[in-house]
Amino acid sequence: MPIEIYTLGGYNEVGKNCTAIKVDNEVVICDMGIHLESYIKYTEDEDILAISPLRLTEVGAIPDIAPIKDLRNKVKAIIPTHAHLDHVGAIPFLASKFRAPIFCTPLTVAVIRAILRDEKMTIPNKIKTLSPNSQYKLSKNIKIEFINMTHSIPQTAMLALHTKYGVILYANDFKFDSTPTLGKKPNFKRLKDLGEKGIFALICDSTYAPLRAKTPSESVAKEMLKEVMLGTESTGKLVAITTFSSHLARLKSIIEFGKQMNRKIIFLGRSLAKYVYAGQDTNLINFEKDAKILRYRKQISGKLKEVNKNRGKYLLVVTGHQGEPKAVLSRISRKEYPFEFKPEDHVIFSTSVIPTEINIKNREKLETALKNQGVRIFRDVHVSGHAAREDLRDLINITNPKHIIPAHGNPEMKEALADLAFEMRYKPGNVHLSQDGQKITLKPKRI
């Protein structure tokens, strides 16, 4: 029988990742994420809120699972590869449509449970832990394997589906970082072992495929942070920094340098608290010994009154790196707390602007407000968590896949990965460009 790959989300844009793979009469769903731009545009928030799944589907915030409605009883597992919202954010809304367990790494389990707990949401699906570099026999014909990878959140995995037709490797998202600042290096040995046997199909992150480079290590971002935080005069000035709430490695570096600055470190915001507590629950980090973590508006208001009295003694780590209207940094800029920035205060964006219309608009509005208050702005103190073109070339060389399916990108990104495959002598019939809601049919030979 042919293998059918349903490209449900992440094939028109970056985000809303969801791919269903049908092998004979069994289906595995890889990722179940939200489209952050559409979600934030609808809610003005980056936190998951209890909203109608139908409405979220209509506004394009979660995948449309209609193409697999007739396969619901064949779904054996839902497998998010890591804990970013564009890979797990739709689970509270869609997982209950399937009578299947959810398999994910310990940190991903903790984040999903935190989302459900915070919003008082429930799903009937069992959530099962599968550690990086572990395997599980899902059925008589399918074995799943998590291969440890580096990304901008710990415990990211590539998913290998072992079938009688060969291995299907789902590689969304990853980077090849041999000097990570938190967690283990990529499991190159296992990738090479699978590559020697031959991968039947590679479903691959194409976000940075147009960039003709190798993505720098997180250790480079750490040095960039050190230069700004320790190498810029800030005596008597407030220092605030914002980054991805899920980027525990980056947050670890921020705490390290904040301590060297002899500042009291305070984390402000719901999503920061969610990921930090999930990381602590899984023993990856222990930030509470060095930082105070506040999630609710009343708590934040009270603490900012205290900060105002001795501004030069504090380092604020806040939500709002993309200028989200309801995030802490935006609220401070609008003077919604009993606190305001003063001239020469520092705001460090340890992130880049995700180039979508809503993010660009929100960040411009935020930065304008900060500039009007005389704030010093440090932008792009950041390296990406996505593999660039030369990393993707290495992955293809290592795994030697027969078929390549570009994913996690807009048309330009996917076409760049396809172009790389053609450059590496792949034939057009073995490179498959798809869009949301479509199906790719592959005809394998049984091994």
Image (cartoon, helix red, strand yellow):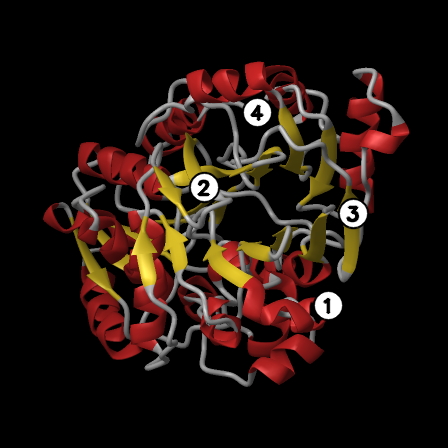
Instruction: Nearest to the eye among marks 1 and 2: give it.
Output: 2
301 to the left or right of 358: left
- Residue at horizontal 45 percent and vertical 23 percent from the top: 177
Gap between marks 3 and 4 measured at Cα: 32 Å
Q: Look at the numbered disc 4 and give the secondary structure of its residue.
A: loop
Q: Which mark is residue 215?
A: 4
Residue at disc 1, secondary structure: helix
Answer with mark 1 or mark 4, whichever residue precedes in sequence: 1
In the rendered image, the residue lying farthest to the right is 428
Q: Which mark is residue 441?
A: 3
Q: Nearer the viewer, mark 3 or mark 4?
A: 3
Alpha carbon distance from label 2 to label 3: 21 Å
Q: First in sequence, mark 1 or 2: give its number.
A: 1
Q: Position of residue 150 (x, y in %)?
A: 43, 31
Regarding residue 108, the answer to whether it shows in the image is yes
Task: Quadrant for residue 215, please give it.
Answer: top right
* Residue at 71%, 55% in the rendered image: 6
**Residue nearest the viewer, comparing 211 with 206:** 206
Q: Amino acid at mark 3?
A: Thr
Amino acid at the residue labelled 4: Thr
x and y percentages locating residue 199 in the rendered image? 62, 26
**Residue 227, x across and y down, in percent:** 39, 26
Rendered residue at 39%/50% (across/down): 246
Residue 212 vertical position relative to residue 54 in the rendered view, above or below: above
Q: CA distance from mark 4 to mark 2?
A: 31 Å
Residue type of the residue flagged with mark 1: Pro
Q: Earlier in the sequence, mark 3 or mark 4?
A: 4
Tell me the residue that label 2 is attached to: 143
54 or 126: nearer the viewer: 126
Q: Is residue 418 above or below residue 318?
A: above
Residue topped by disc 1: 67
